[in-house]
Amino acid sequence: MRRPFLGAILAVAVFLAGAGAEDRVSIPPLPPPVEGAIRVAQFNAALNRPGAGVLLSDIRDGDAQVGAIATIIRAVRPDILLLNEFDRDAEGRALDAFAALLSRSGDDVGRGVTGEPVDYPHRFHAPVNTGVPSHRDLDGDGRTTGPGDAWGWGAFPGQYGMAILSRYPIRAEEARTWQLFRWSSLPGALRPSLPDGALFHDDETWGLLRLSSKSHWAVPIDTPDGALALIAAHPTPPVFDGPEDRNGRRNHDEIRLLHAIATEPSAEWLIDDAGRAGGVSAGTPFVIVGDLNADPADGAARREALLALLADERVHDPRPRSDGAVSAAKTQGAGNQRQKGNAAHDTADWRDTPGPGNLRVDYVLPSIGLEVTGSGVFWPEPGTPGADLMASGKRAVSSDHRLVWVDIRLP
C-alpha cells in the first residue's frame, strides 16, 4: 500500500544488521499440501525501490530485506506465487536474480537467508502502468510530470510491479493482460467528481485514463492435474487523494474489473490488450490473487465491489487466518480496537494511530470447483520462529503485508 513511506525501505538493512540478521533462527517449513494438492500464494513483498535498477543491485548485494522476504517464501514454499510490489525491469533481470537467490544453498546465498532452497523455473512478468508518463495533470496539482501523473502512481516505469513464480510451466504466449483498458470502458464506472458534482478530469482526459493502476492478468499455468488460470491484480490504495476520491473509486472499479475477468467470459466490453473480448473461458478453473487494498469490514475502501466478489457463488473464500494477527491486534490496540472484522484474517500490519490498523487486504480466491485442502496467513506469534521478520506499522523488516496461501486440488 505504501506511497509516502519509501524512506522506510531504505532503512531496512540498518535495522536488520542491528538485530543480527546473520544469526536469524531458521524457520521450520510449513507442512506441504496434502497429496494431489498444490499451494497458491499471494505476497506483497514490498520489494519496491526509489529508482530503476536499485532492486537488482540489492538482490545481488545481499540486502537484508530481500533476505527476509526470501526466508518467508522458503518457509511457506508455494508452488505458484504472485509477488506484488516487485519492481520490474523489461528484461526481467531482477526477477531472475531473485529466483536464483531462492534456489541457491550454502554460504553464497546472502545475509539473513535461511531455509531449504525452493526452485521456480517458470516465471512471468509484463508491463505495468506504474511510473508510465501520461503527460497530463492527472492528480490536479498543476504539473504533468509527477508520480501522480503517471498512468499508475510511480516514480519510474515498473515500480511496484507484479511477477509470478511457478514450479509449473506457464503458457506465457496465451497470457492475457488489461494494462491499457480504459476506465471509461467499464460499465457504470465511478468517474471521480467533487462533492458539488464537478468532474475532476475533463472529458478528453477521462477518455484516456487507464483503469488498472498496475495491470490485470489472466495467466494459464499447466499444473500436474490440468490447466489453471491465475487471475492477478494489485488495485490502487483507496487513499492518498482528495475529496474527488479518485483512488477510492479506482480501487472499487479495479476490483470490479478483476471480478469480470474471472466470471464474465462473454462480456463484449471486456477487451484485453490484444483486442480479445471477454474474460476467462467458462468452466476454466481459476484462482484470483492479489493485494486488493480493500477490507470486507474496515478501512477506507468503497467495499461494495469486494463484497460482491466475495459473495459470488462461483468464487470460494477460504478466509485464511493466523494466530499472529490476533496477537498483533491485541498488543497494538488503538485503531484495531474499533474494527468490526475478525483480526484473525488480517494480512497487513499498518499504522495503528490514528488508523487504519491491521486489515485484510490480500486474497487467494479459488473458483468453486477447486477443492480447498488448507489455507493460512504467514504471521508467526511473538517468540516463535519467523516473528522477527514481521514488520509493524512503519517499521520495515520484510513487508507490512503477510504472505497468504491456499492449498487446492484440481478436479
Image (cartoon, helix red, strand yellow):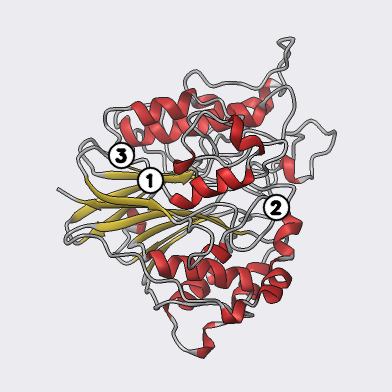
Q: Badges 3 and 2: C-beta atoms under 8 Å apart?
A: no
Give the SS element for disc 3.
Answer: loop
Report if residue 319 is visible in the image.
yes
Q: Secondary structure at mark 2?
A: loop
Residue designated by label 1: 320
Q: Amino acid at mark 2?
A: Lys
Q: Amino acid at mark 1?
A: Pro
- Residue 388 placed where, x, y %? 57, 66
Residue labelled with disc 2: 394
Residue most extreme to the bottom: 107
Q: Which mark is residue 2?
A: none
SS at circle 1: loop
Q: Measure the alpha-carbon separation of dots 1 and 2.
A: 24 Å
Q: Amino acid at mark 3?
A: Val
The N terminus: image quadrant: top right
Q: Residues within 10 Å of mark 2 (few under 14, many from 20)?
A: some
Q: Quickly name the residue at label 3.
A: 280
Residue situated in front as seen by the camera: 288 or 361: 361
Q: Of all residues shown, which one is farthest toward the right?
A: 142
Question: Which residue is pictured at 37% across the width and 38% down the height?
Answer: 276
Q: Position of residue 110 (x, y in %)?
A: 56, 82
Pointers 1 and 2 in contact (CB under 8 A)? Answer: no
**Is residue 267 in sight in this rendering?**
no
Badge 3 crowding class, 10 Å Cα cut-off, few under 14, some 14 to 19, many 20 or more, is many
Q: Is residue 214 left or right of residue 205?
A: left
Looking at the picture, does residue 298 appear above or below residue 58?
Answer: above
Compared with 64, 242 (above or below) is above
Give how far across and how far down residue 125 sits, in percent.
Answer: 47, 59
Left or right side of 274 for 234: right
Q: Is residue 359 above or below residue 13?
A: above
Q: Nearer the viewer, residue 93 or 72?
A: 72
From the viewer's perspective, is 263 left or right of 398? Answer: left
